[in-house]
Image (cartoon, helix red, strand yellow):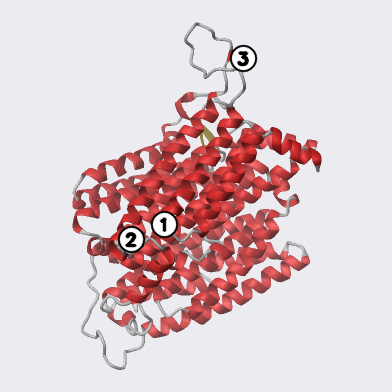
């Protein structure tokens, strides 16, 4: 048990990332306010990027951009995790934009951001 | 290298390009470009299928000729080529069948965007079928999500807006879990290509290390993709989204989009983990259980529904259950049944949705059971196609759905006793329920309405609608009659699917 906690503490980046992921996931799933849902989604994705970036960083090494003719790979970190983070950011930005646009249209129509109320109003409109 | 080998890559990239062009063209020209391109992708996929069947093996296409650890890969075998051919063909037919609805349901200046989304969706489906790289898979999963949500949303009404929101939120939860799985797996293995990860995972697993993380990762992948493909407890978003969209959108979403994720999941099971690890982690048992529940609960949901399109959507939930039961049997024949079901459902459900669009035309735009009474008489071709589709779903011999049920039953007989009893029971109950909700609809369609409602309305058969339905009927019968060669091709494809 003690080892478990000390491991959690040593890998504090990963621990923090998982906690943030949980917060984001729960907000996206449970929160009634659409804008807060979007914030939750961004929390969730950022937590994953934090996890990746923390995994990809090796203390004392540089980003793999050669400036002074030093081509020894042991001076540099692996660029793939950072590349994945950048790709992931592009994806989550576009999804966020889509969701915000959708939220704007919902607000225009129903004048509320509460998803339960919107569902209720839409159902009433149908009947 | 034969020129044909470039085709899978071309179908993916040029579909994206086609989407970009559609975004700047006017509606009519976007339609022509998109349909022409879909026909070309269909031809390309077919020639790839012929090529793989002839060469009898798979090939790996390296993007930019970079070798394994650095480059991105496409892997093409018989199964992939077969899926791609069926998907592109069904996509073309679904768009053709609902063509006039698209122009009626979308705002006039936005119709070109509909075709943009169709192109993007086609591209992402091809990519999910062919890709050999997990992160590429994730990116195309998200493209798929955005495109399919937009397809629901383009018919602008309160109902579709709410349905899109729920669909989007559930999809994002699913892809969040999926991404987390990829990232943890990458943290353990340091690879992104499926084969390389597979080799490392086998090594790690043999040493007995990281057994808990591997269980968690398999769970994350399964739950993430199950949410996106609407497996039973996560299906609540599906009936709204598929029931309220325009006919072509419902057809494409139900018939193809859900399957794209399942194909990715099957690839992950085969290539990344290998079936032995999946079985030893007991994940397949859970998928089997939820699949069996989905078969029954989806059918009960459909039975209670008084709205034709929502009924079809619930029926999709049940049909997705069949696929997961096949996967959960963790045998080759079970997996074959799952893949056959993917194909059979992909050619049947879009036909039913296109018919329901036609029935709405001759019933004053309503889709309640009471309104569509006699719609089969006012739209005979639609009625015939719906009858074929419904009989196929019920599992009458010589139709596509029968092949699945037969293969699935064969698979069930090979499993352990409790699983066999459950599988056979679920198949029997679900077939009975299918008959209980499809057969009354057929009768309803061909009964003269008492009050003579809408009796003056007659279906106008545009060449696109009539042609699409005819081809769909022919496909369904062809699939049922030449089932043995399809099943053979699928099992040959699956044999070369693994690591």
- Numbered disc 2: secondary structure: helix
Q: Chain of mark 1?
A: A
Q: Nearer the viewer, residue B52 or B254?
A: B254
Measured as percent of width and height from the top left, residue B242 is found at: 41, 65
Residue on which disc 2 sits: A106
Q: Is residue B372 visible?
A: yes
Q: Is residue B54 visible?
A: no
Measured as percent of width and height from the top left, residue B259 is found at: 50, 55
Please give left or right for residue B47 compared with residue B382 in the image: right
Q: Mark 2 or mark 1: which comes first in sequence?
A: 1
Measuring 69% from the left and 43% from the top, which residue is drawn there? B214
Residue on which disc 3 sits: A74
Measured as percent of width and height from the top left, residue B416 is found at: 77, 63
Please give left or right for residue B404 compared with residue B88 in the image: right
Q: Could you tell me how far apart the alpha carbons at marks 2 and 1 are, in whole angstroms?
A: 10 Å
Q: Chain of mark 3?
A: A
Contact between labelled residues 1 and 2, with CB atoms less than 8 Å apart: yes
Q: Nearer the viewer, mark 2 or mark 3?
A: 2
Measured as percent of width and height from the top left, residue B268 is found at: 60, 45
Q: Could you tell me how far apart the alpha carbons at marks 2 and 3 are, in whole angstroms?
A: 53 Å
Crowd class of label 2 (few under 14; some 14 to 19; many from 20; radius 10 Å): many
Q: Is residue A118 above or below residue B363?
A: above
- Numbered disc 1: secondary structure: helix
- Numbered disc 3: secondary structure: helix
Please give left or right for residue B195 compared with residue B250 in the image: right
Crowd class of label 1 (few under 14; some 14 to 19; many from 20; radius 10 Å): many
Which quadrant of the figure has residue B475? Answer: bottom left
Residue on which disc 1 sits: A34
Q: Nearer the viewer, residue A11 or B221?
A: A11
């Amino acid at each position: 048990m003690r080892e478990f906690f000390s491991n959690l503490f040593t890998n504090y980046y990963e621990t923090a990332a998982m906690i943030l992921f949980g917060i984001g996931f729960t907000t996206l799933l449970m929160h009634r306010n659409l804008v807060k849902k979007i914030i939750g989604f961004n929390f969730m994705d950022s937590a994953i990027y934090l996890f990746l970036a923390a995994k990809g960083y090796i203390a004392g090494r540089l980003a793999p951009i050669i400036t002074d003719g030093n081509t020894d790979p042991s001076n540099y970190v692996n660029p793939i995790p950072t590349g994945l983070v950048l790709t992931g950011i592009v994806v989550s930005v576009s999804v966020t934009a889509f969701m915000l646009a959708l939220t704007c249209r919902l607000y225009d129509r129903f004048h509320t951001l509460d998803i339960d109320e919107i569902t209720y109003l839409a159902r009433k409109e149908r009947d | 290298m034969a020129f044909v080998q470039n085709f899978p890559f071309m179908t993916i990239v040029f579909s994206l390009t086609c989407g970009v062009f559609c975004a700047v063209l006017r509606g009519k020209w976007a339609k022509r470009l998109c349909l022409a391109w879909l026909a070309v992708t269909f031809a390309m996929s077919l020639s790839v299928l012929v090529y793989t069947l002839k060469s009898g093996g798979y090939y790996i296409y390296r993007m930019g000729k970079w070798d394994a650890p650095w480059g991105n890969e496409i892997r093409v075998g018989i199964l992939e080529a077969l899926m791609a051919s069926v998907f592109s063909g069904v996509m073309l037919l679904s768009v053709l069948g609902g063509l006039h609805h698209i122009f009626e349901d979308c705002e006039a200046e936005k119709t070109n965007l509909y075709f943009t989304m169709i192109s993007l969706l086609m591209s992402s489906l091809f990519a999910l079928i062919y890709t050999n790289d997990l992160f590429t898979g994730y990116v195309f999963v998200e493209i798929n999500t955005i495109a399919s949500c937009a397809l629901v949303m383009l018919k602008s009404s309160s109902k579709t807006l709410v349905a899109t929101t729920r669909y989007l939120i559930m999809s994002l939860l699913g892809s969040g879990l999926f991404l987390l799985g990829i990232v943890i797996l990458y943290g353990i293995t340091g690879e992104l290509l499926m084969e390389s990860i597979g080799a490392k995972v086998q090594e790690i697993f043999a040493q007995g290390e990281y057994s808990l993380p591997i269980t968690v990762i398999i769970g994350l992948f399964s739950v993430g993709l199950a949410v996106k493909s609407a497996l039973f407890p996560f299906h609540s978003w599906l009936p709204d989204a598929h029931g309220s969209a325009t006919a072509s959108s419902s057809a494409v979403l139900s018939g193809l989009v859900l399957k794209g994720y399942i194909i990715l999941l099957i690839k992950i099971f085969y290539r990344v983990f290998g079936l032995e690890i999946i079985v030893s982690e007991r994940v397949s048992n859970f998928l089997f259980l939820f699949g069996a529940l989905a078969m029954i609960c989806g059918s009960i949901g459909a039975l209670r529904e008084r709205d034709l399109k929502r009924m079809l959507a619930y029926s999709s939930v049940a049909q997705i259950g069949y696929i997961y039961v096949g996967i959960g049997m963790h045998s080759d024949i079970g997996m074959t049944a799952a893949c056959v079901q993917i194909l059979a459902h992909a050619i049947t459900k879009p036909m039913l949705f296109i018919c329901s669009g036609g029935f709405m035309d001759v019933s004053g735009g309503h889709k309640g059971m009471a309104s569509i009474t006699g719609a089969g008489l006012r739209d005979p071709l639609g009625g015939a196609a719906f009858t074929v589709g419904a009989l196929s779903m019920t599992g009458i011999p010589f139709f596509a759905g029968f092949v699945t049920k037969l293969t699935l039953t064969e698979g069930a007989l090979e499993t352990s006793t409790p699983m066999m009893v459950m599988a056979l029971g679920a198949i029997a109950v679900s077939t009975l329920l299918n008959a209980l909700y499809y057969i009354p609809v057929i009768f309803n369609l061909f009964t003269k309405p008492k009050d003579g409602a809408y009796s003056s309305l007659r279906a106008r058969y545009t060449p696109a609608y009539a042609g699409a339905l005819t081809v769909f009927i022919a496909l369904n019968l062809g699939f049922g009659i030449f089932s043995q060669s399809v099943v053979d091709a699928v099992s040959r494809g699956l044999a070369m699917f693994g690591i």
